[in-house]
Amino acid sequence: MRGKIIGQPIPRVEGAEKVSGGLRYAADTVRPGMLWGKVLRSALPHARLLHVDASRAKKLLGVKAVIAAADVNPRLIGAMLQDMPVFARDRVRYVGEEIAAVAAVDADTAEEAVHLIDVEYEELPAVFDPLEAMKPEAPVLHPDYASYRGPRTKMPELKNVQTLVTAGKGEIQKGFAESDRIFENSFRTQLVHQGYIEPYACTVEIDGEGRVAVWVANQAYFKLRKTLGEYLEIPPQQITIHPSNMGGSFGAKDFLSLTPAAYYLAKQTGRPVRFVKSYTEELTASSPRHPAVIVLRTGVKKDGTIWAWEGRTFYNGGAYGAYKPNPQGSMSGAYMVAGSYDIPHTLLEGYCVYTNQVPCGYFRAPGETQTLFAVESHIDMMAEALGIGPLEFRRLNCLKEGSTRATGEPLSDPHCLEVLDRVNKISGWGSKRRQSAAKNWLAGRGMALGDRHVGHGDSSFELVLENDGTLRLLSGVGDQGVGAYTMHRQVVSHLLGVDPNAVKIEVRDTSSAPYDQGIKGARGMHIEGQSVGRAAESLTEALRATAASHWDTAIEGVSWVNGAALLKQNGRKKRLTLKELARVSSQPLKGFGEFVGHKPDVYSFQAVVVDVEVDSESGEARLRHLYFVYDVGTIINPLIHQGQIEGGIVQGLGYALAEEIQLDDGRITTVTLGDYKIPNIRDNVPLTTSLVRAKVGPGPFGAKSVAEAGISVVAPAVANAVYNATGVRITELPVTAEKVRNGLLCRYKA
């Protein structure tokens, strides 16, 4: 395949292996003499640990080791806020917290041994709601919080607060004083799991010289090596992280997790140890999305101009703040609590709060799904009260050229208006409301608006010319399923003018791979793409230099055209292909590229319109059609691009209508995938997608990000559509039939 490569839907590098079942994942790792690890978890949400007795477990045939807090480094761990022990020491703070671990000859023996460990507790008062946890009478969950290592956003003066971030512009009190109307509303969102199909797995092996090998599903191999080395107090060069394919992550597999436990068990037994979480463990003891309480107060002028906006988000962080990896140890979605609107006076606050439930972490567009549900519901509520249409209200107030964001940050090339106008056009928003054909079903429409930043970070690649003329791209980048390797191949293929199949992808372990910071924040094509491009350009220079030396001419006279070096001299042309250059070169030909990118001021705007029908008797809501618009730069691979959009929208539908990890006094009761309602193929909704072309993008060839598109705007659009159909306003996700039916009954009684 030659010619135009960028913009073509070429097949996935790993596609054939995936669909044939040949691709290996972390749980497929088998090492000689390997043992199985299992974890004993807390049965109480908050209690002192008085005694842990493993004597019965150690006597079980097949058990090789049992470890607890006394057997590991007491140092607390955490991505930014270091507040979590590897095993609970003096107290447990949530149901599911790790107390001890077992290594045994097989999984069943390890499981049996876990149940033979006896734990004596002294139960303590617990708190499960973030607002309740901040009250003076709430129990203090971390008495030693002031001594924890952490970011500058730590707030020891606030009760049970992990971190607090603030932003704003203008003068908020002046803005409210100058407003003609004030609107106040509160919203809540639920606890949800990332829903990846591959459960967390890791294997740790220690050789005779103390060198550590790790096979694990993780988003950031080099970061894992560094943090594991710091915790174990061994040089990171003594640790090798072997890349494993990931069956999804969405932000969750970015932490030490069970690797320290596997290390200590392997060290004690002298044998490799493997952990594979069950789905019950995934649902009850992983790092799900934060539930949140969002409180909004907005001042509006008579003409509908939003003049002041105060937004406070209280994220239920659970028992520990360790899973939040951004420099503030916070949720970046807290900065989206005023949406995509041009407002002169703002104050944004984002609290992450300790409670006695499972610690929460990142999930695609972290913190933003919560805030945009509130913002876009609030926008519709204000528009109705002001007698302005939802579309017109958004058009009047949305970010435009010359606007600054609610945080005060500058903005380049915004396409907010174009996105709104396009979704209006493709959905026929202003046309007569569609009527339901079925009896007792009420039809409605809703919309929502949002935007998403382009990620930043550091990545490097090496591109090597092989003797047979093929190219090998050396990488330290994991792929959690987004198709990164395919797009890397397309960038190289385009820049060097070769067939994509001539570019082989080799993902190496941390002992020999080029450095990569890790998968995060929709940074793939911005950071990795630019780095791959630089590696290709570096190799091109080496190829031109080799050709110039062979022809005994200056490099300036040698160009690179269609996969070959070209020299035009005295009316004649000379040409050397990759295979010929490999043959004539006296040394291996390589190109290296590194790119360190900061957060750009370019954003991708998105809007969605949802058509629903609601059963007036049961309250069930069914989606009939979605219309989605996104602003994009150059699309590297349209099949992968559209797949990201549709995947985000499906996750948004689950969040809007069904998904919820339910708790009873801190105990998770949603313990199987049968209980946890992830959308499946029968829940598919017809989707119309339209793309607005932006002028600029920070990625190669002007690419922008797409990884977190769609997911944040679906829930508010659904809630707005249900209200449009029924007059029932749902302010707490998910939008279930029970909530809608109760709202309808209240309206009928009124």
Image: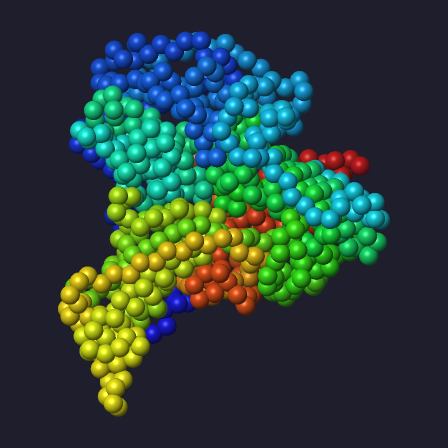
Q: Nearer the viewer, residue 503 or 114?
A: 503
The percent position of residue 348, horizontal first and vertical second, equals: 67, 42
When asked about the image quadrant of residue 275, the answer is top left
Q: Is residue 413 above or below residue 343?
A: below
> Can residue 732 be spotted in the picture?
no
Which residue sits at x=59%, y=61%?
A: 412
The percent position of residue 486, horizontal first and vertical second, equals: 34, 58
Q: How is the image coloured?
A: rainbow
Which residue sits at x=54%, y=39%?
A: 328
Q: Quadrant of the C terminus?
A: top right
Q: Is residue 259 left or right of residue 97?
A: left
Q: Is residue 639 above or below residue 349?
A: below
When asked about the image quadrant of residue 424, the answer is bottom right
Q: Is residue 696 above or below residue 144?
A: below
The percent position of residue 285, horizontal first and vertical second, equals: 44, 28
Which residue sits at x=41%, y=62%?
A: 637
Which residue sits at x=33%, y=26%?
A: 261
Q: Is residue 175 above or below residue 325?
A: below
The percent position of residue 154, horizontal first and vertical second, equals: 57, 31
When asked about the image quadrant of residue 447, the answer is bottom right
Q: Nearer the viewer, residue 273 or 712?
A: 273
Q: Nearer the viewer, residue 142 or 186?
A: 142
Q: Quadrant of the N terminus?
A: bottom left
